[in-house]
Image (tube, rainbow, N blue to C red):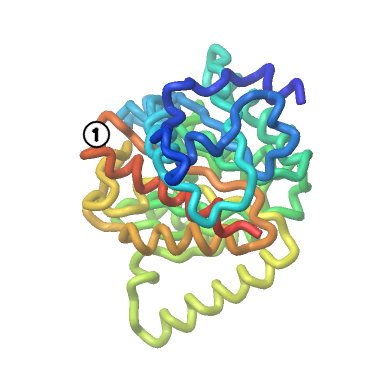
Amino acid sequence: MSTQFDLTSRPEGSVFFSRNDPNDPRLGEFVRHTADHYDNADIVIIGCPQDEGVRRNGGRVGAAEAPNAIRRQFYKLTTFNIRKRIFDLGDVKWAGSLEATHDAMTEVVKAVLHEGRRVIVLGGGNDISYADGKAMSEVFGRDWWIAVNVDAHLDVRVSEERNSGTPYRQLLDDGLLLPKYFYEVGFQSHLASPIYYEYIRDLGVNRISLELVRSRSEADIELRESIRNKFIGQSSSLNTFFGFDMDVVRSADSPGVSAPSPLGLRAGEFIQLVKYAASLANTKLIEFSEMNPKYDIDDRTAKLVAVAMHRFCTGVS
């Protein structure tokens, strides 16, 4: 237990909301966050409050404030239908560089996964998918895990230094993730470089664009179902990771992100996808990234992530 506590700082007490009403308990009173309750946890929340990767990628900084912005909304929600014991481990400490912080993140996530607990990660920039994916690969083995990138972008950029656009390229190039077990979901063609699209296509990565999600043509429906059936078959025996970049949701529903788009999944569709992730027995880790409180409107995006977390916690078996 020492690794995950040594490399993290405890969550701020002010985020744990209470109505002080025994007839209306809130998650701020239900979720534990002191070390003496850790051993009983089924689900562990881990924050990574940094946006250095976003800055390096030329995005709008501000995601470093996301973990606590999300926590403030999550802990206001009720305990309705939540049966699992949830523990908030706090935030991975900044280790002096993005690379060193990723290393720390990987070690923390590995320690929790080794104990058989489910993990919810709160970013921070989407570069954390590399740290989380590396943890999945090292705990379960390269041949035994699936990555699902639910994102408006492909995040397979080539760069001399890692950033929020490189995580899955790194996982693939480092041999930590097999292309046949990688799914790109919700990306938008006008935001995808043809060169990077050809890269994942030629590798055999599974691809479901936003256009394919929306299409009603018979051929596209058949293709969607084929990919879905392949995923169902794989996820029944392989450990699964879902990375939810909040820019996959249209800006009307998710304005507080690093790279907003007027197109994207609707809030209800996004929640359904999170519920689906929760329903899979082998989902070990979900991650929410790129939420940016600096540009949020009425906490709309933070609330959406909070509801998604709630649905995940109610849906896991």
Residue 55 on image: x %, y % = 37, 25
Compared across the picture, whether 226 is left or right of 306 comes to right
134 or 50, which is in the foreground?
50
Q: Residue at x 39, y 33 (%)?
A: 72
Task: Kindly tell me whether residue 173 is visible in this rendering.
Answer: no
Coordinates of residue 187 in the picture (x, y in percent):
39, 57
Q: At numbered mark 1, what does the secondary structure look like: helix, strand or loop?
A: helix
Pinpoint residue 302: horizontal percent, then vertical percent: 35, 40
Q: Is residue 138 visible?
A: yes
Q: Is residue 228 above or below residue 121?
A: below
Q: Hey, which residue is sitting farthest top in the picture?
A: 96
**Relative to 3, 171 lies left or right:** left
Viewer-proximal residue among 309 and 210: 309
* Quarter of the image where one finds residue 298: top left
> Is 231 placed above or below 57 here?
below
Seen from this angle, which residue lies furthest bottom?
Answer: 218
| Residue at (57, 15) in percent of width and height | 95
Residue at 76 percent across and 26 percent down: it is 1
Please give the residue where the numbered disc 1 appears in the rendered image: 295
Query: Which residue does the image show at 42% across and 84% down from the upper left?
Result: 219
Callout 1 crowding tier (Cα within 10 Å): few <14, some 14–19, many ≥20? some
Question: In which quadrant will I find the C terminus?
Answer: bottom right
User: Can you say whether 164 is above or below 272 in the image?
Assistant: above
Q: Amino acid at mark 1?
A: Tyr
Q: Could you tell me residue 100's position as x and y percent?
A: 60, 19
